[in-house]
Amino acid sequence: MSSSSSSNPSPFGYDASFPLAVVGATLFCLLGIIHFYQFFHYRTWVFYPMLLALLMEMIGFISRAYSIHHTTVLAPFLISYITVILAPSFIAAACYMVFGRMIWLVTPAVWREFRSLWIPARWITPIFVTLDLLSFLIQLSGLGSVASAHSPNISPEETQKRLNTGISTLRTGLIVQLFGFGIFMVIGVRFIMVSGKWKSDWPNDGGRWRRCVWAINICCALIMLRAVYRVVEFTGTQGQGSYFDRYEWPFWVFDALIVLSVFITFVTVHPGQYLPNSFTGFRLSKKHLDSQPRELENRFSITAIIGRHPNNHTRVPTSDTEAIELGRR
């Protein structure tokens, strides 16, 4: 974001396209209708941060379209600027929360430890959501400085000082977000790799749940690319901004299209299609999931042996009691 000049009074720093802004607003609104329907249809309450992200994008692009034809009114521009930058933080939170539920759904208790997942299952969601919240608050602080720089009652020197402070803070928040994404993707790939070790104990869906895990990892990689773009955008010559800050096409390629792709991906691979109702609530009782008697964990190794034996024609046990009884035989 660069300060406006007399030759280019647009607060965007370039001649923003009104038709593109209308198309963007329309697409986000359509995706919002679909996501809201899926949210209530599948009752995926855990996915609520994704709806917040969509609402912010809808507001952001509607405000962008309005601001293009009302360049002297700063409020719509600032609303667009703030919502579009902060929305991906809620996408990240949604990905972290659904990934945590997937781990609790498909991972036997004996595999939920550090040596298997590199982060214990019960700490995966809290750690990454905390990092995301920290990134969000830092970015929000930076955006506050940027917004205050547009006050008409301060000197040009003070305006530039606040802009520089805000942009620097925004960049720091995005770097924290990148750090969280990087670790999360390592954990995500690790989970996909080790989950084959308990393949016989996957939910009875033919491994369909892996599509959702892959979708989460791919979407996180896309949002990570978008964060890299924003970091580069906010790294420019003092008072002038970077190349990405002076032209509109990078915004559409590296921000709008990426975020649109993420929302479209979760329309086609919605977590509600893979998580049972008991795992889609606002809260998940981990104590209940961890309260199985230790001897029942032997079920995983017993069913794995039964399932892998080439000459075995015995049906797989359908309950913990039956599994233990078969193990005694």
Image (tube, helix red, strand yellow):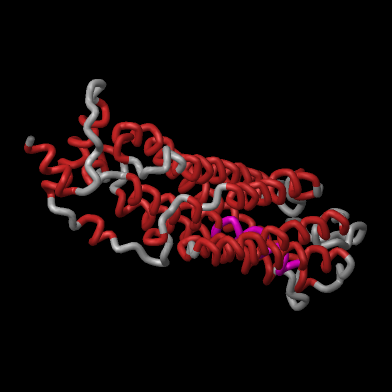
Residue at 78 percent of width and 76 percent of height: 152
Residue 218 at x, y percent in the picture? 55, 41
* Most distant residue in the bottom direction: 153
What secondary structure is the stretch in magenta mostly built from?
helix
Q: Nearer the viewer, residue 30 or 120?
A: 30
Q: Nearer the viewer, residue 278 or 324?
A: 324
Q: Is 140 located above or below residue 127 in the figure?
A: below
Q: Is 280 located above or below residue 151 in the figure?
A: above
Range covered by the magenta-colored residues: 77-90
153 sits left or right of 96 in the view: right
Q: Nearer the viewer, residue 174 or 310?
A: 310
289 sits left or right of 71 in the view: left
Residue 247 at x, y percent in the picture? 81, 47
* Most distant residue in the top direction: 310
Residue at 36 percent of width and 44 percent of height: 203
Q: Is residue 41 magenta?
A: no
Hey, which quadrant is residue 291 in on the image?
A: bottom left
Residue at 42 percent of width and 53 percent of height: 128
Q: Is residue 161 visible?
A: no
201 sits left or right of 170 in the view: left
Residue at 24 percent of width and 61 percent of height: 288
Residue 137 at x, y percent in the picture? 51, 64
Quadrant placement of the N terminus: bottom right
Hey, which quadrant is residue 290 in on the image?
A: bottom left
Quadrant placement of the C terminus: top left
